[in-house]
Image (cartoon, rainbow, N blue to C red):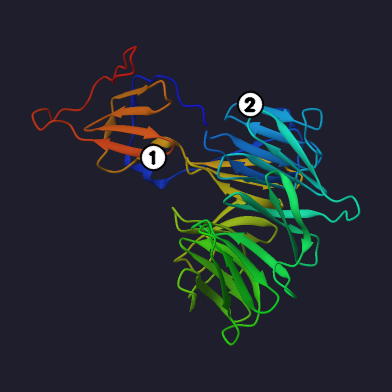
Amino acid sequence: MLARIPLVLFFVVTNSAIAQNYSMRNFTAVDGLPQSQVNAMVEDANGYLWIGTFGGGLARFDGREFKVYTTLDGLFSNIVSYLQLDSHQNLWIVHPHGLTKFDGQTFKRIATPAINQKYIWKLFNLNDTIFFQVGSQGSIGKIYRDSITVWDQPILPGKKVFYSLRTTLRSICYLLNDSSFLMLHPNGGRTRISFKGIFNSVSEMVNYHRNILLKTDRGFYFFDYKNAKFFPANLSVQDHIVAYDSLSKTFWIEKAGGVWKQPVNSFQPTEQVVTDITVLQILFDRENNAWLATSGNGLFKYAMPDFEKCASGKLGSVMAIAQDKSGSTWLGSRSLLKINHGKVTHYQLNSSNRNEIMEIKIDKTGEV
């Protein structure tokens, strides 16, 4: 998705690069963003960032420019409250009183029953069925083959949904009003797991590796939903958790009107990312960048340069850099390195040649 650096002839990486200096860029209407309130984001399989706004419609960002879609292109509404990709890479666009499905070519509007104009939020797909929440009374709806088959019904008789979450194992987790969780699994199975007697209420849920981290009235707990168990979590986070970055093992928290980073093993926040800005969602893309959707301040990209991602004391001087047709960056030093989508691959030189690589060339066929 991201534009890469052009061909460079010489670059030196020193040990100071290990400090990991991050850059921040703010995208607004000047850059082509259709609206300053960004409600939702999702990244597709091609690396495009899809952005839902409050009144400006839908935008697709390719790393350089925004392509905007509105009701004139087929959206049900220009107010987008939630975005989700299904297993076929169809983009589901949630509006307050309707939905739009985009298959990559055309938009299809899906209207809700006219007699009941409750708002829609939190949509997930499970195999060929789409589940979404309806209104404020804990009801759900279902879509099958692009038609609403269930609307404003309890997920179980007499039960209400307080909150829902897509787990890292692709199950849907529903927090119910009877002190239990309902798990809907990709294999079609269902699991009810009660937390009565362990804690009384849950105020926050966030994916934490293969568990769910719960903030409860009795402190933090890990929810091992695969084995239906709860374990106390010894964490020092005092503030609202916006997101968790599993790669760096860092919480992104809301504190004093801003967003901070707090490593898991830290007793307090260590870095302020933004201040006096309301962040609605944080998305970590495949290149390990963090995208911040804000209420009124546009879109922020928090990024670490590729060279810092692969920096180490063993790297030494980089004497050659080239970029191939796929956008991968190749570095030559005492070894050969390839950077692609934020991932670094090392290729060792032959033992008979221990000198540094002085030049990298890529021919017309793409061979290095």
Badge 2 element: loop
Which residue is painted at 81% across and 32% down in the image?
Answer: 71
The C terminus lies in quadrant? top left
Badge 1 element: strand
The x and y percentages for residue 294 are 70, 47
Q: Is residue 160 left or right of residue 195?
A: right
The x and y percentages for residue 284 are 54, 47
Camera-nearest residue between 284 and 275: 284
The x and y percentages for residue 361 are 30, 17
Residue that carries the numbered disc 1 in the rendered image? 343
Crowdedness near tag 1: few (<14), some (14–19) or many (≥20) residues, C-alpha within 10 Å: some
Residue that carries the numbered disc 2 in the rendered image? 65
Of the numbered discs 2 and 1, the one sitting upstream in the chain is 2
The vertical placement of 106 against 342, above or below, is above
**Residue 336 visible to the viewer:** yes
Q: Is residue 367 left or right of residue 166?
A: left
Which residue is painted at 74% across and 32% down in the image?
Answer: 29
The vertical placement of 122 against 292, above or below, is below
Which residue is painted at 46% across and 62% down in the image?
Answer: 210
Residue 306: quadrant of the picture: top left
Q: Look at label 2 and name its amino acid.
A: Glu
Residue 202: quadrant of the picture: bottom right
The vertical placement of 86 against 328, above or below, is below
